Image: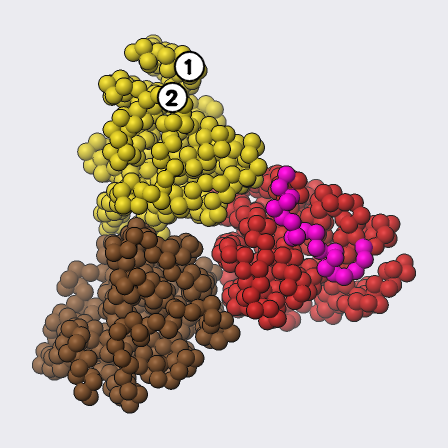
Chain colours: A brown, B red, C yellow
Amino acid sequence: MKLLLHEIRRNPLLWLLAFVPVVFAAEWLKPEAHTLLFVLSVLAILPLATLLSHATESVAAKTGDAAGGLLNATLGNLTELVIALTALAAGQYMLVKASIAGAIVTNTLFMLGASFLLGGLKHHVQEYNRVNARFQAGLLLLATVALLIPSAVAQADSVTRAAFIQQLSVGLAVLLLVAYGLGMLFSLGTHRELFAGAEHAQSDETGEAPWPLRLALSTLAGVTVLVALVSEIFVESVQQAAETFGMSPAFVGFIVVALVGGAAEMASAFSGARKNRLDLSVGIALGSAAQIALFVAPVLVLLSYVLGPQPMNLLFWPGAVVMVLIATLTAGFVTVGGRSAWFVGVLLLMVYLIFAMTLYLLPPQG
Amino acid sequence: MKLLLHEIRRNPLLWLLAFVPVVFAAEWLKPEAHTLLFVLSVLAILPLATLLSHATESVAAKTGDAAGGLLNATLGNLTELVIALTALAAGQYMLVKASIAGAIVTNTLFMLGASFLLGGLKHHVQEYNRVNARFQAGLLLLATVALLIPSAVAQADSVTRAAFIQQLSVGLAVLLLVAYGLGMLFSLGTHRELFAGAEHAQSDETGEAPWPLRLALSTLAGVTVLVALVSEIFVESVQQAAETFGMSPAFVGFIVVALVGGAAEMASAFSGARKNRLDLSVGIALGSAAQIALFVAPVLVLLSYVLGPQPMNLLFWPGAVVMVLIATLTAGFVTVGGRSAWFVGVLLLMVYLIFAMTLYLLPPQG
Amino acid sequence: MKLLLHEIRRNPLLWLLAFVPVVFAAEWLKPEAHTLLFVLSVLAILPLATLLSHATESVAAKTGDAAGGLLNATLGNLTELVIALTALAAGQYMLVKASIAGAIVTNTLFMLGASFLLGGLKHHVQEYNRVNARFQAGLLLLATVALLIPSAVAQADSVTRAAFIQQLSVGLAVLLLVAYGLGMLFSLGTHRELFAGAEHAQSDETGEAPWPLRLALSTLAGVTVLVALVSEIFVESVQQAAETFGMSPAFVGFIVVALVGGAAEMASAFSGARKNRLDLSVGIALGSAAQIALFVAPVLVLLSYVLGPQPMNLLFWPGAVVMVLIATLTAGFVTVGGRSAWFVGVLLLMVYLIFAMTLYLLPPQG
């Protein structure tokens, strides 16, 4: 507990934890004040996500290499998973899908691009382990194909089609999970030496000693519950708050939710880039995108049979599919060489800005 | 003849030759037993394709480097060509097109992926000549553009459009044949030194002495006739047998025909990969795909004016175009580095599985 | 003036300047003879574009490195800009858009491909600075995304959609100009040492001494006016002349205008390739394409508010978007290695031929 308090004193982001009780109080007193609740829930999720991320890393550091890597690889995007599960249980499938696609695009373009830019402003040319970049890009490419195929093949609007899309989605979800599992076997097991440097550095880099296992585990459990509770308020308020701010629903799901959910990882990725440890930044950005595409998305499809009012499929809005495809191809193109300078970051951020602007301007039901 | 018998004794696959007379007998006695005829014709085509492949290589070995390469490059996919010609003459254009697209996808993803996987399970990291891989990927990219353009441009459903697509298809067929010819001039002629290792090894690798020219030529002629006769039974029975097995017509054309037609090359590619001669496997897989795209497909378009009930065009089902495009891009992405490990094979096979599953689940007329 | 005359005597292309007065006379005497006026205006634009190009380079050489590079980068495609502005003022938005897309495709595939082919026929294998090639390919990729997004997102045909596309187009235009500016800061400023060789060589290469600043500036001003006047005749006559020759409007805008507008740069690029200075050719071809995509196109969108009868958007014909996308991907694929041989040129030219043939055969209103 002392350690936790020490941590909170050190990291100004954690001072936002004060908003966690505030958001619950506001929900109790003014359940109709959507805009206020939205802003408060965002402010409360940010520090919780940071705690969750540090707790996961601490558990991973204690449990040793392979099991720790496994844990990091499955719980690394716990915040995104919990938010999406809340939206799933509320039957908001549009929001779930937009947040999946948005998280992939945000991690691939914004997190990677801003890392390259921030690192490049300080260091003339930076190098990184391109084996890991290409591995993650390969996983992303596979997931993109899986997200693309249903909308490429679905043509006629009939009853058979709905059943077909649903069967296909379950099949694709299973394939993606198998691929993700084999990918972990490859990168943490049989060929771990090729990935040297990319994984290990993470907890060193944050410059913080890992917490004792008990503290880490209880933080993990407690904070997850808090994130789930705050997420419920967030998901309920986000759409109406967005209208107040004049944002389209597509923009909210794709951009706002993705930025909120990934804030903790972004802090680590950007700090790594400034310290010229680009391996870390590239690993977090692309690894996080791959994890959402190959682990979070299929888990949501399968859990929708248990939690949701009806099964969720993998048929995405074609515009989102195009954006995911472009993001993956751009990341693949940019990471071929294993070198970076500030303009590479600008290129990625510009593509992200194009998407954000398009979604912002998009008229409703467009 | 003695050599041929010796060969048959050595290679268990050739024992299946026994099914050649059986399939003709069955066709005579039970012309309505489609499922039986389908299974028997597959079992009969497999050894015939193996013989054809060995005969072609033997003639190539005898006629010297350039001419031999030329021969291998044109007759290497003789089985696929004969099956497609039989379907063409029967007016089954859907089957012909599905088998062209399917052969490209199967060779690029399944044959290459399984080679990487089988090789990678035995050898930690494998290297291969990436000049040849990029050359074949470039040819494939060109062919993909040619297959993609008609469906990208065709929009309105009018009479002028049909004429336009037909003219365009003939023009594209001629361009592809010219590109294929120039590609052979480049890889077997002016720049052959860059491709060293990829071509030559093939007949050494199979561990079999080339046959004498006379035996090879007469085998080539005789077996081609047999393949044509068995193909007729195969093409007639395949659709109805597929229904019995609950497969969609798209799945049959795309997956089943492609796997049957390419079985002989797969055997060579997989054996090469296990022996750590990945140059051979990559050369066979991508070379075979390029040959079907730039030689077999345009020849079929041109021959449809002579053999078919009406001219065939190059307007493919959009889903098939997407799959060919993804397969080509994936192969291009994967072969940039000239190195491979087992997970690269898994990635390619997963993409193939996604396609196969989609086609299997696809409702008819979807 | 003596220098100008000397230049004219040396360069046979400049003898075509005689057609400048001829085309004005013909316009005066026979304003209805569209085919004649079309041919004469093409013959008059070619030498004017050459003069413009040489004058720009001379001014650039005098004003020093960074400013000169900036000038070259903005005025290098002055001919294309003036032709497009003339078409814009005449309200021919279809022609403007076709010529933008056509110029990108023609520079990326035809100019680059012919350079590789011509250089490769003389030199066995050629190498070039791949940093510059990848930089330009990255800019092109960004521009392609910007051109692709409006047609990927636009779905319903409603009033809101028109307003959305217009807002989006202005936003994209501003983003592209910012990206272009930052790209110049990168390649001429902070990281210029990575681009060594690519830029500098241009005026050396043409083997001509730069003109004195006064001559260069007055030539620049005078010839720009002449190009504008001849362009007016060209734009007026091109569509009807095309019908006479049996060409589709799409073919004219995409192929003919692009070839006429880029003739001067092609001469430099091809001459560089023959002299084994492929850096120069790749720089001109891809740099020119990037400049049209990131500078000329957005400037036209913004100027359409001032000059045109109504604002122009960036919603392109889907077929054109596909072609630009394929051209960019092909150029990116081909320039990964920084090496070239004649067959690489053939590949690029074949893709260009596929496009040209498709557009030539395309029925009107297709």
Marks 2 and 1: in contact by CB < 8 Å? yes
Amino acid type assigned to the residue bearing label 1 in the image: Arg
User: Residue at image x 57%, y 37%?
Assistant: C124
Q: Residue furthest bottom?
A: A214
Q: Earlier in the sequence, mark 1 or mark 2?
A: 1
| Chain under disc 2 | C
User: Residue at image x 54%, y 57%?
Assistant: B338
x, y percent for residue A232: 23, 78
x, y percent for residue C285: 41, 36
Question: What residue did someone put label 2 on?
Answer: C208
Image quadrant holding the N terminus of chain B, namely: bottom right
Q: For residue B205, which quarter of the picture?
A: bottom right
Q: Is residue B22 above or below residue A72?
A: above
Query: Label 2's element?
Result: loop
- The residues colored magenta run B190-210
Amino acid type assigned to the residue bearing label 2 in the image: Glu
Q: Residue furthest left?
A: A29
User: Residue at image x 32%, y 22%?
Assistant: C210
Q: Is residue B29 above or below residue C133?
A: below
Side (left or right) of B172 relative to C226: right
x, y percent for residue A348: 32, 54
Question: What residue did someone put label 1 on?
Answer: C10
| Chain under disc 1 | C
